[in-house]
Amino acid sequence: MKTIRIIFLGMFLLVVAGCSDEHFEAIDPHLSFVATVNILEPSLTFYDQAAKQIANWSLKKSYTGASLVGNDAVLLYGHQLTEADLYELSSGKILKIIETGIGVTNTLYDEASERIFITNSKTNELSSYTMNGKLQKKVKLGNYPMSMTVRDDKLYVINYKDTILSIVSTEKLQKLEQWSIPKSSHGLFISPETNEIWIGGHGEGSSPNEAVHVYNLMTGKHKSEIITPLMPVGFAQHNEDVTIVSHGANMIYDVQLDGTINWQQEIGANPFAVAYLRNQLVVAGYDDQVIYFLENGHIQHQVKSGKGPFQLLVREG
């Protein structure tokens, strides 16, 4: 009987050791990449500037999003998960598990304050954490906080199921202002050159959104609309132009900062995300599961992605 106990103990220790040693393929810290966050069969797939796949992390948890934390870490989260996991890219090993509770809709790392910010749709809260995953503070926002960006020590947070844009101090996590915006807004972009914030969205019910709404960044006053049908939800800036992706019509629009459309192109099937990797525009087709690499509006590469590429992460080494 004693021998059996020893055997089982040995097997248990082997399993524990195996779990602690589990890690993903390491990513060269000097390598520039674009990574797709695939959510139908969770995975993280990395591509270099030549559109060549350099690594694929097959994920066991039902992650729904991710964000880069500094130059060598990625934070993975899931709306139905109680934890967010911080992984080191250069080793593929887990660094920290952050207790979040279910309902996480987005995460953002702010280099200036060295804080991680997490929005939650169950509690309608925005939380700040240290780089070590220690909870610092929480603040209540509107209904279903999700899209967010940061500029000059301020967080701009869209409350998706509300008509409110919340502006929060990154340092004290205090609400500074709130502006009126359309319900079901999604995706935002700040233009410091024109002192504006652009906001996209899905629209409601039988009235899908056809425009990006432009607001004065200082006053919150609505200035204009950029007609970019249908359902503009993503933005990526390169030099003096901004690419807008409208997933409802499978369209991308190249737009000047004054709102003038340079060109537009149909691409992919249900594209949700756009990003720039140096001079290349990258578009993720969610339904066709294809990643498109473009230069000057022309497709240079098409590569098959994992299932459900929903988000793009870019690191330029």
Image (tube, rainbow, N blue to C red):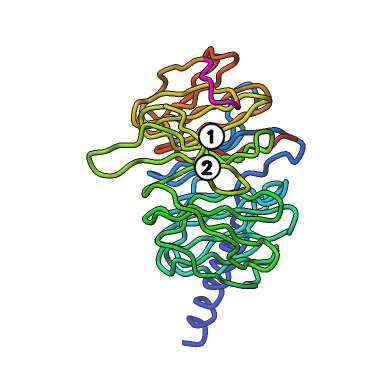
**Residue, x 55% and y 61% (percent of image)?**
118
Look at the image and tell me in which quarter the C terminus lies: top right
Q: Which residue is found at the position 54% from the left and 51% from the top?
A: 148
Q: Position of residue 75 (x, y in %)?
A: 59, 54
Viewer-nearest residue: 24 or 244: 244
Residue at image x 56%, y 55%? 107
Q: Amino acid at mark 1?
A: Phe
The tag earlier along the polypeptide, 2 or 1, is 2
Q: Main secondary structure of the magenta part?
A: loop
Above or below residue 98? Residue 222 is above
Q: Position of residue 194 (x, y in %)?
A: 65, 34
Instruction: Reply above or below: 11 against 229.
Output: below
Residue at the extreme bottom: 2
Residue 20 x %, y %: 61, 64
- Mark 2, Cα crowd under 10 Å, few <14 / some 14-19 / many 20+, is many
Name the secondary structure under disc 2.
Answer: strand
Instruction: Identify which residue, 45 or 101, lies in the foreground.
Output: 101
Q: Which residues are magenta?
A: 257-262
In this rendering, is residue 99 above or below 249? below
Residue 188: image tag: 2
**Image-based side of 269 in relation to 187, left or right:** left
Cα distance, mark 2 to mark 1?
Answer: 7 Å
Q: Secondary structure at mark 1?
A: strand
Q: Tell me the quarter of the picture where residue 242 sits.
A: top right
The percent position of residue 46, horizontal first and vertical second, equals 58, 36
Asked if the stretch drawn in magenta spans residue 258, the answer is yes
Provide the residue designation for mark 1. 235
